[in-house]
Image (cartoon, grey):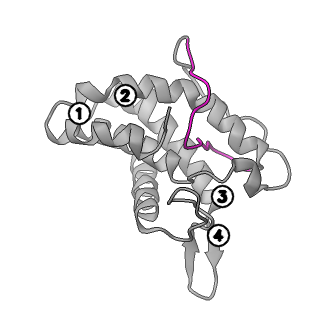
């Protein structure tokens, strides 16, 4: 099962068509995978959550009600994240934003959207690298285009910026 645009894109139009309820089943699936995504990031030395492009295991059972972050291992190891698309968390989080912003459902925000946005931003704020010469943060080795080692691809940076704004607004 894919976690990138292959999974998300089919739901984008549901919010603009005022049929957001058609996208809601994905939220529980994503949140069931959140503890595993937190472990993947922690094992690579990063806080937050990192989903790979492909989910190898399906998660059954109830949706967790809280998401305590695991202890982060000492040294950062980008290769432990896999040569996968680092934009997967941002892709997965976007529909949480759209769902909240089209419904203003405070319970959804508190129980589902904010934990997701927070976990993603915890990862990105630690992973992004400050380029002092250019006075900007950069997303390095993103693999946005499958099998590549892209630096600063436009759409992941736009998604991350959007998530950062939402994280501040929702907190």
Give x and y (percent) for residue 36. Answer: 65, 31
Dots 2 and 1: beta carbons under 8 Å? yes
Q: Secondary structure at mark 4?
A: strand
Classify residue 71 as left or right of residue 23: right
Q: Viewer-proximal residue, 104 or 140?
A: 140
Query: Mark on residue 151?
Result: none
Q: Which residue is mark 1?
A: 103
Separation of residues labelled 1 and 3 (CA atoms): 31 Å
User: How many numbered marks have been drawn onto this rendered protein structure?
Assistant: 4
Q: Secondary structure at mark 3?
A: helix
Which comes sooner in the sequence, label 4 or label 1?
1
Separation of residues labelled 3 and 4 (CA atoms): 8 Å
The residue most toward the top is 61
Name the residue rendered at 69%, 47% in the picture: 47
Crowding at mark 3 (Cα within 10 Å: few <14, some 14-19, many 20+): few
Q: Which residue is mark 4?
A: 129
Give x and y (percent) for residue 2. Answer: 49, 37
Query: Mark on residue 126?
Result: 3
Q: Which residue is mark 2?
A: 108
Separation of residues labelled 4 and 1 (CA atoms): 35 Å
Q: Secondary structure at mark 2?
A: helix
The residue most toward the right is 74
Dots 2 and 3: beta carbons under 8 Å? no
Which comes sooner in the sequence, label 2 or label 1?
1
Which comes sooner in the sequence, label 1 or label 3?
1
Name the residue rendered at 41%, 28% in the picture: 27
Question: Which stretch did the figure color magenta?
Answer: 46-60
């Amino acid at each position: 099962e894919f976690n990138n645009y292959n999974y998300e894109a089919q739901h984008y139009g549901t919010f603009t068509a005022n049929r957001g309820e058609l996208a809601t089943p994905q939220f529980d699936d994503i949140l069931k995978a959140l503890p595993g995504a937190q472990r993947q990031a922690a094992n690579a030395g990063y806080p937050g959550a990192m989903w790979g492009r492909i989910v190898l295991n399906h998660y059954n059972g109830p949706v967790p009600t809280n998401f305590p972050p695991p202890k982060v291992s000492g040294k950062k190891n980008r290769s432990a994240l896999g040569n996968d698309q680092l934009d997967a968390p941002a892709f997965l989080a976007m529909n949480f934003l759209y769902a909240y912003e089209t419904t203003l459902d405070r319970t959804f925000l508190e129980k589902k959207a904010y934990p997701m946005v927070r976990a993603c931003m915890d990862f990105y704020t630690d992973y992004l690298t400050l380029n002092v010469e250019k006075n900007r943060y950069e997303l390095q080795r993103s693999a946005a285009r499958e099998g590549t080692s892209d630096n600063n691809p436009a759409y992941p940076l736009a998604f991350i910026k959007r998530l950062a704004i939402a994280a501040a607004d929702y907190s």
